[in-house]
Image (cartoon, rainbow, N blue to C red):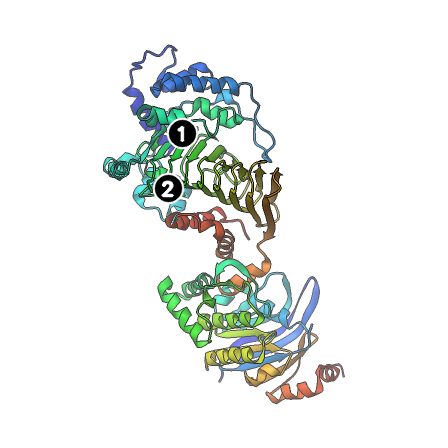
Amino acid sequence: MATPLLEIEDLYAGVDGKEIIKGFNLTINAGEIHALMGPNGAGKSTLSNILCGKPGYHITSGRVYFKGKDLLKLSAEDRAREGLFLSMQYPVEIPGVSITSFLKHAVNAVRKYQGMPELDTMEFIKILRQEGKNLGLDADMIKRDVNVGFSGGEKKRLETLQMSILKPTLAILDEADSGLDIDALRVVAEGVNALHTKDNALLVITHYQRLLNYIVPDSVHIYADGKIVRTGGKELAMELEQKGYAEFMKEKND
Amino acid sequence: MSNENKNNIEIVDEAGDNYKYGFVTDIKADTVPAGLNEDIIRLISHKKGEPDWLLDWRLKAFKFWQTMVEPVWAKLSYDKIDYQNLSYYSAPKQKVAPKSLAEVDKSLLDTYEKLGIPLKEQEVLSGVVAVDAVFDSVSVATTYRAKLAEQGVIFSSISEAVREHPDLVKQYLGSVVPYTDNFFACLNSAVFTDGSFVYIPKGVKCPMELSTYFRINAKNTGQFERTLIIADDDSYVSYLEGCTAPQRDENQLHAAIVEIVVLDNAEVKYSTVQNWYPGDKDGKGGVYNFVTKRAACRGVNSKVSWTQVETGSAVTWKYPSCVLQGDNSSGEFYSVAITNNRQQADTGTKMIHIGKNTTSKIISKGISAGFSNQTYRGLVKVSPNADNARNYTQCDSLLIGTTCGSHTVPYIENRNRTAILEHEATTSKISDEQLFYCRQRGIGEEEAVSLIVNGFCKEVMQHLPMEFAIEAAKLINISLEGSVG
C-alpha cells in the first residue's frame, strides 16, 4: 500500500472573490511523479500558490492533507519546513541578498523546525558548492544576489539548486520549462530526476508535453476549468499534444 | 554610558570638589537648577577649569543664541522644547543605580541578549557597574593610550585637550562649525559638556580604530557632546562613534557637534551607530537628536567619509556634511536610517564643492516602518570656482507597511558649468512576492524582512568596519521587530 503524501479532496478556492478551483481532487503517493497539464489561464499557478500558502487566496471548501497533516492550517513557512517545495514560474529578485546567505537561512530554518542542528557557514558552503557542481553551475553564480540579473534559464537552475539543497518531500514544479532552451531544459530535468527517490514525489505543472520527455510521469492529469477532467498514463500527454486542449474541454462539457 | 552611572560619577566628583575657584554664584554644585543663563555657563566653564578665551567664546555663543529662533523647516513635529526647563550641567539625579542585572528592565536585557553582548558589558550599559570597574579600565585605557602616544596621536576628552593642548583646540574649535551656524550648534557651543578630541600628526596612519566606547574619559559626555578631530597632512584615522547597544539615557534633548579638519592628503573615516531610546510604541519619551556634523577637507587630496546607521531617537535632525575646499578633495556619505513606530527622522548630507576637481558621493538608504516618517534632505552645492566637480547621489527608500512615510528633498545648487551631477532616487516596498518567496523556502516572515532589509542596506553596511557591521546588521533586525504581520 502506497503512502499518500498529498491528498486534495474536493477543493474549491479562488482569489478576489472569484472561484478558480472548483472541485479539485488529487492524491499523490511517495515515489510518484504526476503531471498536471492545462491551458493558459486554467488556474494552474493558483493551485500551486494555494497549496504553498501564498497570502491573498481564499478557500471555500475542501480539504488538503500533506503527510497526514491538515496543510491549509499551516503557515507558508511551516509548509516549506514540512517538505513542500515550489519551483516558481517567475522567481523574484532579492537585491543585496546573496544566494549563499539566502539558502543558508532557508536550510537552517528547515533544519531547526525538523529538530536538526543548524549548519555553520563553512559546512553549508561546502554542501552548496557540491550541489552546484552536480547541476553544472558556475561557482561564481552562487556568490550572486538571488535572481538579480539572471536569465530565465539561470533562474530555473537556481530553483533546481534550491530544491537539491532543501530536499523536499513533495516538489511542485510550476512551468519549470518556460523560458528554457533545450540544453537548459535537459540540465534542469536531470537535476530534478536525480533528486527523485521512492520516498518523495513530484507534481509537474506544464502546458507543453516537451518537459515530460525528460521528466517521465507516472500519471498525467488534464486540468480545465478548475478541476481535473481526465487522468491517464504518460501517453495521455502525447494524445493531448496531438488533439489540443479544446478536444478535452469539449469532452468535459459534453 | 548610562545616566545612572554618570550620576554616580558626578556625585563622587562633586564630593571631592570644594569649589576651589571660589565660584561667585550661590548655585550648589550638586543641584544645578534648570535654566540657561550666563551664570550657568560660567559654572560649566569653571567646573571644567577652562581658560578665559573658552568661557568668552561660550558667552558669545550664548548671546548669539538668544537672538536665534529654533528652525522649523525640517519635516518633524515634536512638542516645543522649553530650554529654560532643562538642566545644562549633567544634572545629578538622586535615583539609585540598579544593584544587579536582576533589577534592570527586562526588555533591555532581551535586546542585549539578541545583540550577543557579554554579561560584563551588559552590566556597564545598564548602569549596574561603572566602566572602570569592568574593563580593569586603567590598564586597558593606558595600554591603549600608550600605543597611540608612541605615534604622537592624541585621543582624549575635549576638556583634557583644552588643558593639555590649548593651542590646537583654540585654532580649530568652531572653525568648521562656527557658533553662529545654527540654533542647535550655537546652543552646544554655549553649554557643551564634553566629547572627544583627536589629533593625528603629519604622516601618521592611526594604528587602530578609535572608538568612543573605550575612551577613558567617556564619562561626562552628556547631552551636549562636542567632538573635534584633526587629521594633519598625510595622516589617516578611522573613528567609531556610538554603540549598537541601547543605553539608558534620560536626557531628552541631545545637541551634539562633530567637527573634522582634514589637511593635505589626509583621510578620515567616521562611522556612527546611533541607537538611542526611540520612545515607546506610541511615541512617548525618546531622545530628540539635533546634531551638527561637518568635515572640512581643507587640504589638497584630502578625503572624508561619513558612514552612519541610525536606528534610534524619537526625533533625528542630522546632516553630516563635507566642505570640499582643497583641490582634488573628496567627500562620501553612506547612510542607513531606520524608523519604526512613531519615530521621525529628517536626515541627509551637504556636499559643498569649493576646490577644483572635487568629488562627492552620497548613498542614502531609508527604511520606514510602523507609523514613522522619514525625510532625506540633501544639498549638493558647486561654487563658481569648483571646476570639474563631480557628484553622484543615490537615495533609496524602502517602505514596510502602509502607514509610514518617506520623503526625498534633494537640493542642487550649481554655479559651474563643468560640474557633473547625478541624482538617482527610488522608493520601493518589500513586495509580497519577495516575502512569499522567502517563506516558501522555510524562512519565517520576520527573518525574511530582515534579510531583505539587510540586502537593501548592503552598499552602506560594507563601508562599516567589519565588527561594527555585524552588530549593526543585528541592530537593524531588532529595530524592525514586530513591524510586519
Q: Position of residue B153 (x, y in %)?
A: 31, 36
Between residues B276 and A233, which one lies in front from this camera angle?
A: B276
Regarding residue A70, the answer to whether it shows in the image is yes
| Whole-number angstrom distance, CA of label 2 to CA of label 1 | 28 Å
Q: Residues within 10 Å of mark 2 (few under 14, many from 20)?
A: many
User: Residue B43: which disc?
Assistant: none
Give the residue at mark 1: B222
Residue at 53% x, 45% y is B362
- Please state, as top left, top right, bottom left or bottom right, where the N terminus of chain B lies in the image: top left
User: Residue B236: which disc?
Assistant: 2
Q: Position of residue B287 (x, y in %)?
A: 48, 34
The chain holding disc 1 is B
| Residue B78 against residue A80 in the figure, above or below | above
SS type, badge 1: loop
> Which is in the foreground here, disc 2 or disc 1?
2
Q: Position of residue B347 (x, y in %)?
A: 54, 39
